[in-house]
Image (spheres, rainbow, N blue to C red):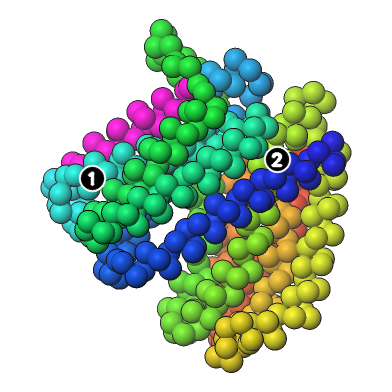
Amino acid sequence: MHNRFWSNVASVVSGSAVAQAIPIIGSIALARVYAPEAFGSYSIWVGLVLILAVIATLRLEMALAVIDEGENRLEAVHLVAVTAVFVGIGMGSCIAALWFYKLVLSSFHTPMLILALIFAAIMTAISDTWQSWAAADGAYPTLIHIRIAQAAAIFATQFGGAFISSTPETLILGHMTGLVIALCIACWRLPMPLPSIQGLPRRLRSFWSAQSRFPLLALPADAISSICSQLPILIVSSRFGTESAGILALTIRVLGAPIALLGRAVLDVFRRYAADAYRRKGNCRSEYISIFSVLLFCSVLFVICTFLFAEPIFRIAFGPQWAMSGLLAIWLAPLFALRFIASPLSYVFYIAGKQNIDLLWQIGLLIVLLCALWLPNSMNSAVIAYSYAYSIMYLIYLGLSYRSSKGIK
């Protein structure tokens, strides 16, 4: 199991690296053909799409790995996709009504942009569902191809469209076209028969009832998690100025990129193995310990390398004006090391049906981080307090997730 697990992780990491590199490199090319104003409007639109896409699935796609493989899981995929469509249409109706009465979204001047927003949110939600299905089934090559296709298609259509019109609408249209292309490739690589409409309302109610912990607990927990991820930049900017926030933002970006890449790959593979073990044995303790041991070893190496080389690397790579980022990296290294361990293993809460514990922890985390960032009198003290507070919370998180892996009710 151990060798096969890390072989699958390596496969997903390689594909994810390509998928993430495409928009990073592509943004350099797009910046030469689109004005900053166009990027600004497009960024607002994409941010709303991502938020609405999470709401559209009600986080039910996270349940796919804990459902038995085969017809039961395929039925669940059907119902999650149908949920995304229904919820998306419902949100679209509400947003359109608010826009009509000029209560929100005044920057969107035409109904077509509202329609584009909802269409893209539904397509993103369905694409996320397909990727979760591929990961749950262990179809890692398909998962990689979907991610690469989506990133490449979005960039290609946006860059090509710039030669016709370099407006925000072109970026939005390119984004939607890329989503459609990626979903077509997903359908080709991982075909899904059309769902039966017979007894659909009853099947939906039954599915929502059986998986009610995901929309009731996982959805608000993920929302709070998103807020927590933005807190340090927002608070440091408001208290100590944009220059300090910029230095901190670069540090978090550089430290977080490799951690997020490998951590997501581990999660994509771990949730399948852990969910299978939990169904067979009633616990996934041995799988948890096995993955924890390897992640811990990698995290220790990460911290040591950061302590030894962060300052000179930041100074050489980004210039003397960014030398402070190297020092911040040293202070934040324990936090990112613990995040690398805790984030993939936190899926145990979903497997064990302990989303309520995750939600309570997220609420506690929000309160602790607000105090850590607001009470200190200097930026350096605030970053150190933030790192220590978050690290302690992650240690608690690991303890709670390990307890859940043992199948304790």
Helix, strand or loop status at disc 1: helix
Q: Residue at x 85, y 42 (%)?
A: 3
Q: Is residue 242 visible?
A: yes
Residue 270 spot, x, y in % from top left = 72, 40
Residue 39 spot, x, y in % from top left = 32, 64
Helix, strand or loop status at disc 2: helix
- Magenta-highlighted residues: 77-97
331, above or below 287, in the image: below
Disc 2 to disc 1, C-alpha distance? 36 Å
91, above or below 224, in the image: above
Residue 277 position by quadrant? top right
Residue type beneath disc 2: Val
Residue 230 spot, x, y in % from top left = 49, 64
Q: Nearer the viewer, residue 67 or 313?
A: 313
- In this figure, which residue is indicated by the disc labeled 2? 269
| Magenta part, dominant SS | helix
- In this figure, which residue is indicated by the disc labeled 1? 114
Q: Earlier in the sequence, mark 2 or mark 1?
A: 1
Callout 2 crowding tier (Cα within 10 Å): few <14, some 14–19, many ≥20: many
Q: Residue furthest bottom?
A: 320
Residue type beneath disc 1: Ile
Q: Nearer the viewer, residue 116 or 189?
A: 189
Q: Residue furthest top?
A: 198
